[in-house]
Amino acid sequence: MHINWKSWNHVTKLDPDKHLSPEQITGVVTSGTDALMLSGTLNVTRENMQELLRQIEQYYMRFRKQDLMSILEAWRQCSATLGRRVRIDMRSSRIDGTAVDIDADGGLLVRRDSGIIEKVLAGDVVHCR
């Protein structure tokens, strides 16, 4: 399997020495990150690395089975952005609207005030009031 890591936008580091609740693990693995890096500096033992691997294994197995829809559904349920008014700042443009969904590619779908829905793959998302 060839992995084009140069196209990745975000890698999340999980430290085996830092306890994360099941909800936090779900939030991380369904966040849209391109990869997980499991590493740490202090107290990285076989036992705490095995525990961290056990916590993320169910998501890895779903991914291996290509059950991406269940991962996407979990991502939608954990999202603090969907249904909210947002401003998305991109390199050369800005989108204001309401975050309405996450598509199968991981793109955020934003409905502008004009009713047009735009897909956003990268940008700084700000929750507005």
Image (cartoon, rainbow, N blue to C red):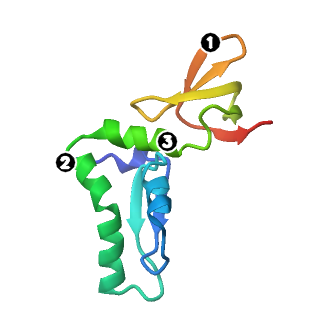
Side of 119 relative to 22 (left or right): right
Instruction: Give the Cα separation between the discs numbered 2 and 1.
Output: 38 Å
Residue 7 position within the rendered picture, expressed as x and y whole percent measured from the top left: 42, 43
Which amino acid, mark 3? Answer: Gln
Residue 77 numbered tag: 3
Disc 3 or disc 1, which is closer to the eye? Answer: 3
Q: What residue does disc 2 label? A: 1
Side of 94 relative to 11 (left or right): right
Total labels: the figure holds 3
**CA neighbours of label 3 inside 10 A, class few (<14), some (14 to 19), many (20+):** few
Which amino acid, mark 1? Answer: Ile
Disc 2 or disc 1, which is closer to the eye? Answer: 1
Residue 123 position within the rendered picture, expressed as x and y whole percent measured from the top left: 62, 38
- Closer to the camera in the image, 27 or 125: 27
Task: State which quadrant residue 25 falls in.
Answer: bottom left
Do labels 3 and 1 touch, CB within 8 Å?
Answer: no
Residue 1 against residue 21 in the figure, above or below: above
| Residue found at x 66% / y 41% | 124
**CA neighbours of label 1 inside 10 A, class few (<14), some (14 to 19), many (20+):** few
| Residue found at x 36% / y 72% | 52
Residue 116 position within the rendered picture, expressed as x and y whole percent measured from the top left: 62, 12
Instruction: Give the Cα separation between the discs numbered 3 and 1.
Output: 24 Å
Residue 53 position within the rendered picture, expressed as x and y whole percent measured from the top left: 31, 69
- Closer to the camera in the image, 31 or 2: 31
Q: What residue does disc 1 label? A: 116
- Closer to the camera in the image, 77 or 42: 77
Residue 82 against residue 23 in the figure, above or below: above
| Residue found at x 36% / y 43% | 71
Residue 11 numbered tag: none
